[in-house]
Image (cartoon, coloured by chain):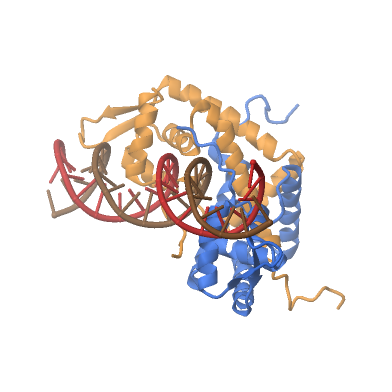
Chain colours: A orange, B blue, C red, D brown
Amino acid sequence: MSRSRVTKPSLEPATGLVFLLTQVGAHAAARFAERLAPLKLAPPHAGILWGIKQADGLSQQALGEKLGMYPSRLVLILDELEQRGFVERRDRETDRRSYALHLTEAGAEILEQIGRITRENQEGICAALDEAERVQLKDLLSRIAAEQQLTLGVHPGYRKLGGAQPK
Amino acid sequence: MSRSRVTKPSLEPATGLVFLLTQVGAHAAARFAERLAPLKLAPPHAGILWGIKQADGLSQQALGEKLGMYPSRLVLILDELEQRGFVERRDRETDRRSYALHLTEAGAEILEQIGRITRENQEGICAALDEAERVQLKDLLSRIAAEQQLTLGVHPGYRKLGGAQPK
DNA sequence: TATTGTTATACTCTATAACTATA
DNA sequence: TATAGTTATAGAGTATAACAATA
């Protein structure tokens, strides 16, 4: 038995894999926000635009559900996006309480810019890894995500759960 | 050339590696906070206790620098930790403006519990991966962290930089 | 005058509840 | 009465500035 002892694993909270994962993840998110800033957009804006593109014509209720955002928060961001001409709230004949959300042409354009920024960011963050290693990393993370039952595409930045914050 | 075309890579922001990394990282952090909650502690508390243990007797100024926290924020959390008997602020003879921070016995004990929770959390988060894969993941993340010049042990949860938030 | 710790405050984000208009 | 969207508001968390004691 020449393996290092397993009975006393490192007590150090700041040296473990999960700490590293948290650190790198938050860094990547911060960098994305930075790169997005010139467009005068924050990550939630990007998520919303992307969500509408995926399911054009959906209601705010449905979008909030899909992204894990509170309706009240969604309203404010949509106001902004509508005012800037990226999103349209169209009346419905069937139910006049709800709107159908649509991307405008400008919205589609800004979404393409967001896509470009996303790729730039990925390139920046993953600069240390070659293509095969990126695939490997994505595979490992995907398996954690699947086992942890994370919903694909639900960004934690717009979550509504809220981690337990004592006191 | 049978490779898939490279000219039009996926525009989808929510399907990329970095999005996944962000998502899993935030999830891991949230789960850690949850597991910590029964101790009536939040992640920053844990970081501070750990920081003091690493450099017993340091000043608040130094600790804030080390963790990337604002002094004003540190004060409040230290007040709490001192009140609960985990930390001691000892006077210095050499410079009566600053205190020397020390872990009490209770502080060392709670830190061990934090260590246990940290390991439990790691076990929970990484359940999908075997030992070799965890090493592999840690290696990949470490290389990203090194290339991105992240400081080891500086948790993003108590950063003072703040990502650019437009509007 | 500069520095350490502290207090006060402003600002953003997040979450909840109350309200309106339709159904 | 229930639901979609909105408005109002409360609460954390974060960042900045002002302040007292000491150097």
- Please provide percent x and percent y for residue A71: 33, 44
- Please provide percent x and percent y for residue B65: 66, 52
- Give whichever of A33, C9 is nearer the camera: C9
The quadrant holding residue A20 is: bottom right
Horizontal relation, residue B35 to residue D23: left or right: left
- Give whichever of B20, B162 is nearer the camera: B162
Residue depicted at x 21% and y 34%: A94
Residue depicted at x 36% and y 42%: A73
Residue depicted at x 55% and y 49%: B23
- Please provide percent x and percent y for residue A44: 46, 39
- Please provide percent x and percent y for residue A130: 77, 40
The answer to whether residue A20 of the structure is visible from this angle is no
Residue C4 vertical placement versus A102 (above, below): below
In the current view of this chain or complex, which residue is farthest to the top?
A105
- Give whichever of A27, B128 is nearer the camera: A27
**How many numbered tags mark residues here?**
0
Q: Quadrant of the C terminus of chain A?
A: bottom left
- Give whichever of B167, A151 is nearer the camera: B167
Q: In which quarter of the image is the N terminus of chain A?
A: bottom right
The quadrant holding residue A19 is: bottom right
The answer to whether residue B3 of the structure is visible from this angle is yes
Horizontal relation, residue A47 to residue D5: left or right: right
